[in-house]
Amino acid sequence: MDFILNYAPVIGALAGVLALLFAVVLAKRVTAVQPGNDRMVEIMNSIHEGAMAFLGRQYKTLVIFVVVMALVIVGAGMLTGGTEGGLNPLTAIPFLVGAVCSILAGNIGMRIATKANARTANAAQESGLNKALGVAFSGGAVMGMSVVGLGLLGLGIVILIFPGQSAIINGFSLGASSVALFGRVGGGIYTKAADVGADLVGKVEAGIPEDDPRNPAVIADNVGDNVGDVAGMGSDLFESYVGSVIAAIALGASLAIGDNGEGVIVPLLLAAWGIISSIIATFFVRTGEGKNPQKALDAGTYVATLLSIVGTFVICKFVLPDTFQNGMYTNTGVFIASVAGLVAGTLIGKITEYYTSADYKPVKDIAASCETGTATNIISGIATGMTSTALPIIVICCGIGAAYYFAGLYGIAIAAVGMLSTTGIVVAVDAYGPISDNAGGIAEMAGLEHHVREITDKLDAVGNTTAAIGKGFAIGSAALTALALFSAYTQAAGVTNIDIMNPMVVIGLFIGGMLPFLFSAMTMSAVGRSASHMITEVRRQFREIPGLMEGTAKPDYARCVDISTTAALREMVMPAVLAVVAPLFVGLVLGSEALGGLLAGSLVTGFLLAVMMSNAGGAWDNAKKYIEGGNFGGKGSDAHAAAVNGDTVGDPFKDTSGPSINILIKLMTIIALVFVPLFL
Amino acid sequence: MDFILNYAPVIGALAGVLALLFAVVLAKRVTAVQPGNDRMVEIMNSIHEGAMAFLGRQYKTLVIFVVVMALVIVGAGMLTGGTEGGLNPLTAIPFLVGAVCSILAGNIGMRIATKANARTANAAQESGLNKALGVAFSGGAVMGMSVVGLGLLGLGIVILIFPGQSAIINGFSLGASSVALFGRVGGGIYTKAADVGADLVGKVEAGIPEDDPRNPAVIADNVGDNVGDVAGMGSDLFESYVGSVIAAIALGASLAIGDNGEGVIVPLLLAAWGIISSIIATFFVRTGEGKNPQKALDAGTYVATLLSIVGTFVICKFVLPDTFQNGMYTNTGVFIASVAGLVAGTLIGKITEYYTSADYKPVKDIAASCETGTATNIISGIATGMTSTALPIIVICCGIGAAYYFAGLYGIAIAAVGMLSTTGIVVAVDAYGPISDNAGGIAEMAGLEHHVREITDKLDAVGNTTAAIGKGFAIGSAALTALALFSAYTQAAGVTNIDIMNPMVVIGLFIGGMLPFLFSAMTMSAVGRSASHMITEVRRQFREIPGLMEGTAKPDYARCVDISTTAALREMVMPAVLAVVAPLFVGLVLGSEALGGLLAGSLVTGFLLAVMMSNAGGAWDNAKKYIEGGNFGGKGSDAHAAAVNGDTVGDPFKDTSGPSINILIKLMTIIALVFVPLFL
């Protein structure tokens, strides 16, 4: 017991190392597979190089951002550090470590994911469904293991360097948030600019099919899948993952849970056990010919969840005192709080599936509304998105209520840790999606046989569902993490009360509530502007490169990749500035209570808007696919044209603006938490 | 001075009587004008009868609702009335008076508005622009004067019956809210079901122009303009008007502003003076041939605003003590708070105009985005709607901040009273819109000469702008009124603090924030369902009535009017239940602090969604008109087709869901205020 108390950060770090070692094993398993013929290797390399080029360019901007933020931390630290409760300039160190860890995780994940696509296609060709699933999932699991591995290793090291100094450790979370801002917002703009550009000129104007190698934007489009759904999603969940643990640590310390710092240790142990659960669970992801790969992925998730619950019970019972906070709460209560988070995460995923899958009524109704045209389809989709906010809100409220009832404020942070304990497998399942999608694209472009494309289509279809579920999970975890960080903020600010009856708090609520609207408008417009550059370039290539349409000349893929990259990095500047400056401005000018109002307001409307936009977008996408499956007139019908319009509107909803809000609400909260000494 | 203190309710009631007398004068002025030839009279009568039939049917449902609510009040009163601070069963009396006053105001206003349309067309034919403007504006002013007249007369009487018993008087506001629920939500569904039905089958399928008498839904469409923009808007502002005064009275009493109840009296006096200001201002609404009627309407609004400011200064200085609340605030501060409200209302109107008028960049950009198709138009419109929330939020926050800084919580309620002091002229200008719109329709249907239609088109174009501004004002005033009522609620609940750090409050915030999303989804879907019934009926008539398209047979207008009416009343049941039950449920189950969170959450997201939807809808509408004016290819171009889709999406946004949210946020707050004894 004493051993655990003393060495918990080491245990956490070791679990991180274990995850990284497992990632190496998985990566070798992926690269050991043959990538197929020359054409496939060529396409794979193009995608790989495009993706790595984007990351490289992103780092250049990111370095400036990170250095400026570090200087701000040091500067603010020097201004306030002399006084009691001031900002410690050393906070810049965990900040830098957090940023580097998140960058590394994204880099490793992308590197392998973009090597797994052709290999998945080739495995489908040579060995069939199960092997293809194995390659795609292993590729995704590298990202999953990198996220949790580097998250917990980095955090463990930082805690070892600054033992018991949770205000400094918070910097780690800020570093992760900064990278997530670039990964999610920049990545979201990139992927949709490329997608819309490729579709509008290629499919609509030139009349060539999806993933046709003659389309100059086709590589950019495939790169975008990785940039958005692998690196972007990974950085988002990396942020939630470390944020939830850090919030629980901060609250464990400030609420003095246990006499020997047990409350600080438990989040680390839960995260460490979550890694082991996820590793074990990966072995349950296997399927057979003719079976539904969805079942295999679900099996992995359920095993991880179950193992996590069992381990959580043991950890809570073994490590925590029977009762704490003057006997108000028990260690069983902490266990229940953790399970409440896990269950809430699973339920939100299921609800998301209900509203976005063509198997259920909402998407079928949207598809039916396409028969009366685009306008009714749009109205129907928006109404569905709005309606779909109700159940997740109720689930989150029940989760919060249960966690608080059984374990107080600490319980809310533990619920977030519980929800995120299976992050390893969640990210793996999610990153599997774009790999399968790319595999299908490569099979198409390389002209592989029909049965190969059938297998990759099957894998891809499952990827669409997992992507929607993953988005629901990302939003839910972002909300719970932000709430936990918010609680940590209020403790750190020493505000005893943020009273809605105080008009300054109301002003904060109003401004905070508005920010997700403004932020979404910015990211949505950014996609429009970036896509129009892409459209111009693709049109130019079709016009100026002789023999392109005939397939005798090759398009300039790199130019399109470059356009997406440049546009994404330029367009993310304004939203990023808004996310960083708004909380600082309100905190400095209106004070820490108004800032509390701002955080609460943005949390509420941010969660609602993110759910609404992601689900509306997912539902439109699948309504289109449902019609393409032969319903309501099928491809080429008027209903299909209406469905395509809905899908195009939904693209920036679900892949740019919606997920970007996750970052906004977490980043603003962590900025408040780190810079709180300035607002007092 | 003593005289004023003793007789303030009488002064208020007398000002109300004055407004009603002036309404009679205006009504006579309207009915004295000749309504034109037989065909015009026939159409006018159809619209008039359709509108009155809708009101009649609405009353039948409304009576049930009102009786049930009254019984609930009495029942709850008997349960809690015996104890100190319980709900007084007599609250049912002001409740009934409030409902009856609002019904009367709407009935009188509609009655005259639907007689002014043909007369406006005929005045345009016989005397030209100025006379036509005069008739249309006078028709609208009857509604404006009825709203403020019956509002202040009813309130004065109730105060005389229950002097000093502000908890009972709150019932008046609940009565007004109940009628507004039917007026705004039911009216909003009616108007768009008819509009969409008439447009989709008539304009798109049958290819006949707008307002063509062969279209079976044309009368229903014209009725809908009155039902939505005259009765609906009137009941909405009636609710805000009395709600703001009642909140100020309640706060004046509970905060004990002044030793002799001066704080209770000032709101009544401000409202009374506002009536006189509005009456004087109507005489400034006049124009000349070839001039822009917008200027005339603006002149009226500015005169009313200026007079109101001057009077407010005198009242504050003369009636209020120099300082109050232990010298924290001065009577000059109250004056500043009132002006802050007035200025905020004007600014929000101007901002709304900027985002929705084709004279400015946002609408031109949306029109340009139509060139790349429907999807880009939709994205552009939604992004514009979202962006347009930022400035109104900042204006409201500045208003709240200034009012609170200079006059405390009382100041916030006074700011709402200040904003609404010009309600008389605001409603007049707003109700002028549908009268002009109808006049244009009648001119078209009766085949009047081109120059007549030119005049009515000119009046109608101005009506579109005033409608958008009116919507902005309605939302802003709803938000400020809800906030004032919220303050009154917290005082009445005796909660000393609604702490966002308390998870129950967070749960309330989440649920409250979600309700406007769910409510909007419901009203939006309701329009879709109702419109589809209308479409089926119109198609049936075109198919089954021989000679209809040739103009030799008459369509069955009444059947379409009946379908809209039935659908509107059926479809409003679920949203109404949600609005009434949600606050009661949360208050009873989760307690008064969670209910406070719910009110704050719904206020924030409700305001944001309402602004977003109204402005997006208005912008799409005017982008379409801008293209029809010959830009980007004009009518019949692909850009125009895309613009029509945007306009169709925007219709339920701006005329149903957006404005209905005003009712939701006020109604839930007043329910909390009236039923607060149940939650303690």
Image: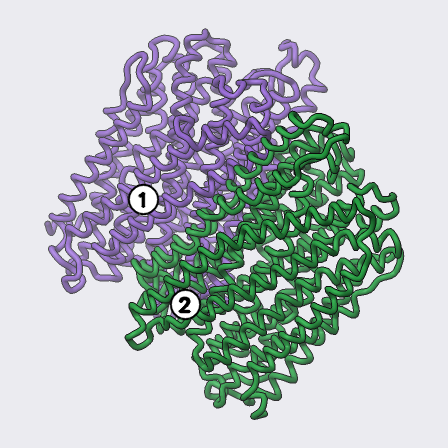
Chain colours: A green, B purple
Classify residue B12 by image quadrant. Answer: top left
Residue type at numbered disc 2: Val
Q: Residue at x 36, y 8 (%)?
A: B126
Q: Nearer the viewer, mark 1 or mark 2?
A: 2
Q: Nearer the viewer, residue B99 or A235?
A: A235
Q: Nearer the viewer, residue A365 or A541?
A: A541
Which chain contains the residue that carries disc 1? Answer: B
The answer to whether mark 1 and mark 2 are in CB contact below 8 A is: no
Q: Which residue ends up furthest to the bottom in the rendered image?
A: A2
Q: Where in the figure is residue B407, as x and y percent of width and height?
A: 21, 55
Q: Is residue B445 depicted above or below B361 in this figure?
A: above
Relative placement, left or right, of B546 versus B159 is right
Give the residue number, with chain letter if any, for mark 2: A674
Q: How many marks?
A: 2
Disc 1 crowd rating (10 Å Cα; few below 14, some 14-19, many 20+) is many
Disc 2 crowd rating (10 Å Cα; few below 14, some 14-19, many 20+) is many
Classify residue B349 by image quadrant. Answer: top left
Relative placement, left or right, of B289 versus A602 is left
Q: Residue at x 51, y 25 (%)?
A: B624
Give the residue number, with chain letter if any, for mark 1: B154
Residue under disc 1 on the same chain as residue under disc 2: no
Q: Helix, strand, or loop for circle 2?
A: helix
Q: Residue at x 85, y 48 (%)?
A: A452
Residue type at numbered disc 1: Gly
